[in-house]
Each structure stands twice: as structure tokens, then as C-alpha cells.
Image (tube, helix red, strand yellow):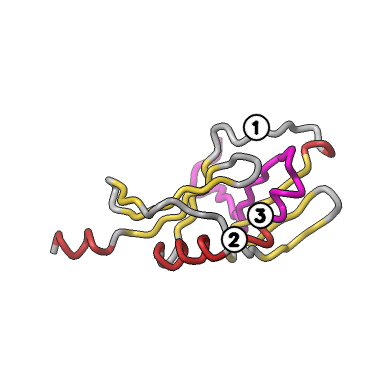
Amino acid sequence: MCSKKEWIMDIKTANTILYCRKWKETVAFYKAQLGLEVTTSCEWFVEFKLNVAARLSIADEARTSIDSNRGKGITITLEVEDIETTHLYLSKVGLNPPPIKDHAWGAKLIHIYDPEGNRLEFWSPNTELDKTTE
């Protein structure tokens, strides 16, 4: 048995792969509307860069052995620097985000859905809450 000191997993990046029935629409959503940078692409798979260590990939269900979950049970949570700026951007690209919500755990957030039905949560710390507790 390995102790923690004997073996340390050195993870370089993390990648979530979404298997999609609406592959073309979902790729266009992340590329054109959200403006994510493509790191790898082929005729059935596209990998997007979220940051230096995180990736999000979209795979065409028709070309893989894994079926789409049709957006059930998936929330992709993305912390952003400024939720108000993110809300404005999402509005400008035609995604019609709902109003920003205050969450009980001290965040402001927005939920939107990609064409496959996967929920995306954009959030940032509620700095107004910090000011009231000082």
C-alpha cells in the first residue's frame, strides 16, 4: 500500500468531456458564443481551453461508444472575475441570461444551458456580502 508520501499524483490538467447528440450546435455554442479557445480539433471532437490547467471537450456521440446524457445531472461550474461583466457579455452574444442571483453560500451566479442541455453556472464571490460582515 502506498502512503501519501510515497506516491503523489502529479495532475497537469483536468478535462471534462461532454458527449453530445447536438454536437455541431454545442461546439458552436462554446466556440462562437462563449468565445473559448480551441486547443484540439478533429471531425468529431473539440477541446476548449478554460484556463491554464482546465479543459472542456465536446465529443460527437455518433462517433463514440459513449452516449449523451442529454444534459441530465451535469453542472459545469465556472468561477469568473466579475459576474456583472459576464452577464453583460452573455447578453451581448444573444444567450439571454436570467438575472444574477445571490446564493446562500456567499456568491452571485447565473445559470444558462448549452444546446445539449448541460447547465453552466457562472459565479463570483459576493463582495457586497463581505462588506456587510466587516
The residue shown at (46%, 48%) is: 111
Does residue 53 belong to the magenta stretch? Answer: no
Which badge, 3 or 2, is on the more N-terminal residue?
A: 3
> Mark 1 or mark 3: which is in front?
3
The span shown in magenta is 1-29
Identify the residue position indicated by label 3 in the image.
29
The residue shown at (60%, 36%) is: 71
Classify mark 3: residues with Cα within 10 Å, few (<14), some (14-19) or many (20+).
Answer: some
| Image position of 106 (left or right of 22) | left
The residue shown at (14%, 59%) is: 133
Does residue 6 belong to the magenta stretch? Answer: yes
Identify the residue position indicated by label 1 in the image.
69
**What is the x, y in percent for residue 66?**
75, 33
Note whether 77 is above or below 71 in the view shown. Answer: below
Identify the residue position indicated by label 2 in the image.
50
Distance from disc 3 to disc 2, alpha carbons, whole Å, reads: 14 Å
Q: Amino acid at mark 2?
A: Leu
Distance from disc 1 to disc 2, alpha carbons, whole Å, reads: 22 Å
Q: Amino acid at mark 3?
A: Phe
Q: Quadrant of residue 34?
A: bottom right
Classify mark 1: residues with Cα within 10 Å, few (<14), some (14-19) or many (20+).
Answer: some
**What is the x, y in percent for residue 2?**
55, 40
| Image position of 48 (left or right of 64) | left
Q: Depth check: 68 or 86 in front?
A: 86
**What is the x, y in percent for residue 37?**
67, 65
Classify mark 2: residues with Cα within 10 Å, few (<14), some (14-19) or many (20+).
Answer: some
